[in-house]
């Protein structure tokens, strides 16, 4: 009797799963997995990005845009911030999809029409849990803007006003492959907030601006994806 119930439960689960896209069973919305065995891969020939000795608190995929403005003096684009949705990828960390999830996500993200939110991309990479958002805010120092990772409105941290981090760049290397196309890999340290003390941006796809611009041209947004490790 029990075996029959189990079987019928399993087969209805199987039916649900087979109706989903061709991915392994995605984690339920809101679910994050154990990150204690997650390891961040960094190039060995550099000292700018140093992996902490503790396990990451969050392993996330960022899907968004990098914004640039044209400098009339250098005729080059300079960064004026970024906006990204951050999906939890801890549940696929030990699957074959993990190594290339940023590329898979970028293909999906570059294919959606303008005006479609990056929030829709998580379901296409079997990582539906929206951890939060990455964007820029006025720097706590009073000058310029600073990157923020804001988990205060989503998932298990929703309603927790301190679940954010504003950070400052501590290390920067060119993307190990195709650095003219893919934005730099970064290490950042906490300046404010209690979400994490260190953040790394690695495995970047796209996001670099054209090499030059015409004076007076409009600001541009360039789509990108990256992995973010929060410690
Ligand atoms: C980036 O550009 C988009 C428009 O493409 C805009 O909605 C967004 O507010 C900009 N964000 C920043 C931080 O510049
Ligand atoms: C590190 O190695 C990568 C390729 O493995 C190369 O593209 C990069 O230029 C090297 N970086 C430094 C700082 O030597
Ligand atoms: C709020 O979030 C911070 C950062 O993740 C965490 O350290 C703290 O324990 C959380 N507070 C509550 C009440 O959950």
Image (tube, rainbow, N blue to C red):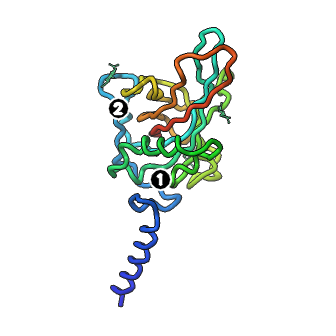
Q: Is residue 170 above or below residue 62?
A: above
For image coordinates 62% across by 46% down, the residue present is 116
Left or right of residue 53: residue 114 = right
| Number of residues whose C-alpha sits closer than 10 Å to that of mark 2, classed few (under 14), some (14–19) or many (20 or more) | some
Give coordinates of residue 83: x percent, y percent.
Answer: 60, 36
Q: Which residue is mark 1?
A: 127
Left or right of residue 54: residue 155 = right
Residue 151 shows up from this direction: yes
Give coordinates of residue 77: x percent, y percent.
Answer: 59, 19
* Ligand 2 quadrant assignment: top left
Q: Give the structural element (helix, strand or loop) at label 1.
A: loop
For image coordinates 41% across by 27% down, the residue present is 175
Q: Which residue is mark 2?
A: 42
Q: Give the structural element (helix, strand or loop) at label 2.
A: loop
Nearer to the camera, 107 or 165: 107
The furthest residue to the bottom: 1
* Image quadrant where residue 102 sits: top left
């Amino acid at each position: 009797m029990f075996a029959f119930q189990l079987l019928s439960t399993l087969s209805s689960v199987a039916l649900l799963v087979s109706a989903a896209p061709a991915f392994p069973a995605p984690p339920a919305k809101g679910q994050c997995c154990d990150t204690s065995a997650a390891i961040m891969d960094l190039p060995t020939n550099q000292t700018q990005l140093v992996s902490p000795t503790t396990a990451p608190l969050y392993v996330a995929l960022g899907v968004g845009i990098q914004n640039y403005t044209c400098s009339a003096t250098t005729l080059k684009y300079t960064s004026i911030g970024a906006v990204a949705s951050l999906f939890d990828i801890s549940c696929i960390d030990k699957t074959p999809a993990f190594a290339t999830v940023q590329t898979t996500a970028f293909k999906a993200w570059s294919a959606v029409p303008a005006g479609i939110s990056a929030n829709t991309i998580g379901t296409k990479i079997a990582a539906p849990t929206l951890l939060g958002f990455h964007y820029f805010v006025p720097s706590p120092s009073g000058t310029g803007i600073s990157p923020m990772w804001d988990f205060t409105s989503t998932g298990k941290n929703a309603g927790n006003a301190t679940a954010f981090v504003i950070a400052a760049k501590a290390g920067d290397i060119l993307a190990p492959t195709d650095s003219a196309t893919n934005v730099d890999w970064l290490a950042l340290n906490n300046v404010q907030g209690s979400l994490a003390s260190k953040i790394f941006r690695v495995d970047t796809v796209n996001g670099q601006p054209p090499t030059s611009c015409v004076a007076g041209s409009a600001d541009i947004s360039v789509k990108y994806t990256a992995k973010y490790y929060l410690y």
